[in-house]
Amino acid sequence: MVKVITYGTYDLLHYGHIRLLERAKALGDYLIVGVTADDFDKTRGKINVQQSLMERVEAVKATGIADEVIIEEYEGQKIDDIRRYGVDIFTVGSDWVGKFDYLNEYCQVIYLPRTEGVSSTELRQSRRAVSLGLVGDADFLNKIEKESRFVNGIRVTGICTRSLDRLSDAIRELGFATEDYEELLERVDAVYIRSQPEEHYAQVKLALERGRHVLCEAPMALSQAQCVELQELAAENKLVLMDAIKTAYATAYARMLLLLKGGRIGKIVSVDAVCTSLRDPAGQDPAEAGRHWDNVYEWGTTALLPVLQLLGGDYCSKSCAVRWFDEGKEHDSFVKADFVYPKAVASVKAGTGVKSEGELVISGTKGYVYVPAPWWKTDYFEIRYEDPNDNKRYFYQLDGEGIRYELVAFAKAVETGKQSFAIDAATSAAICRFMEDFRAGKDLVEI
Ligand code: CTP
């Protein structure tokens, strides 16, 4: 019996795939099809696959052509599979010519002519992309525009800013720039907001009232009540309202949360998160206002994320210390907050004027998680136990600091009409409540 194997992503299964599978099958008696898992595909830069792994597997099975469908989970798996299944022929489309010649050592390699005129990429692109308007003055918008190019389903089409001259050429060439927010809202399906946090609430509200989806850098409002009001407005108008905290969308971070929720370190007793980056004091120059956020927003939000996601927002008490940047006490350079929960504690340190080790440690009754600096760009973490032999290390490739995954999640949410799970409404509201207390000086001492 001649065994044939072929691999692919098979996103939005199309005629080209079916013809390839038919011809692959005709090369022998038994056809094995390897469907590439989401994560592995991400490492090849394809993060815009529209269908889930199971949907793609089901679609391949439904063709009835494959005798066996397997999942390709890791790089290098092809050699393993060829040996394990006793494969005689490896085949793929001619777009891969040369790429798999190394497999000739293990079996015959055949490249089949690719069907002209159809591809998953084109099918994805033919779906109407969400047109996204950028809002704000920060250089960070350059990154968002750049990362959006890796994501199918989203196209940055305009900007509302007071600082166009400072932004990238690509942004200046978008074709539509305005200082009038209403005008931007007229032209786009959705907005990404990175203005000053004081402006968020009004901007988010107006966008939702105008029927636009919103991706907003957290905090989306400066009080819990305002945040809840925005969430309700989004739900009423059936719009997506999502917090943009890139860490939350990093695969490693999301997997770590799942492992912890599954009890891998026992009961969680302490969460300690530190985020710092020293910034030139010139960054606080009023003339530069708009470019940078105050530390409590910039780093406080990210540092709070694992605390609130793992322990929730119902802490019994909180105490917070602040070091101010300026005499007027308007800008902070360092914040340390301690939380006491009924059965746990947490601490966060955030600084733009104080430097520390940017690590995340989560302590439990059976072990702990260690995420080395800079933990907010999570691609690696360890679960450590009393007996080091039990330790486990996890690595997940992180391209683009998490921003492109955040955009993928946003595009998916808009397309499916379902809010993303990455940051839930309660976490979002708890972040806003923290900012509300901070601004009111509640539980706050100065150092
Ligand atoms: N294929 C083909 N003819 C096409 C498209 C794909 O023969 N028009 C083959 C590929 O060469 C590969 C298999 O089908 O052997 C699975 O391809 P996959 O990468 O999943 O699909 P594409 O449409 O090529 O996807 P993309 O546009 O994302 O590259």
Image (tube, rainbow, N blue to C red):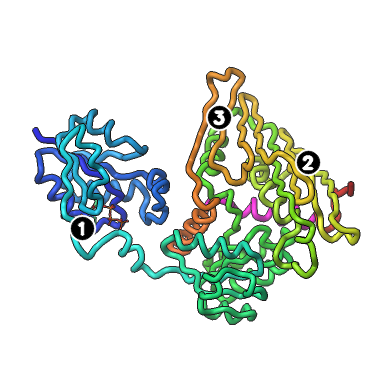
Give the percent coordinates (x, y) of residue 302. 66, 49
Which residue is identified by label 3? 264
Q: Hey, what amino acid is under mark 3?
A: Arg
Q: CA distance from mark 1 to mark 3?
A: 44 Å
> Which of the labelled discs sits on residue 16, or is there none?
1
Give the percent coordinates (x, y) of residue 27. 10, 43
Q: Hey, what amino acid is under mark 2?
A: Asp
Which residue is at a point 50% across and 73% down the rendered structure image? 157
Query: Mostly what secondary structure, the magenta segment?
Result: helix
Which residue is at a point 27% across and 42% down the rendered structure image? 34
Which residue is at a point 58% across and 66% down the rendered structure image? 192
Rendered-image quarter of ligand 1? bottom left
The crowding category of the residue bearing disc 3, from other C-alpha atoms within 10 Å (few below 14, some 14 to 19, many at least 20), is some
Which residue is identified by label 2? 338
Q: Nearer the viewer, residue 33 or 55?
A: 33
Q: CA distance from mark 1 to mark 2?
A: 58 Å
Say what secondary structure mark 3 lies in. loop
Magenta stretch, residue numbers:
421-437
Say what secondary structure mark 2 lies in. strand
Q: Hey, what amino acid is under mark 1?
A: Gly
Which residue is at a point 19% across and 36% down the rendered structure image? 104
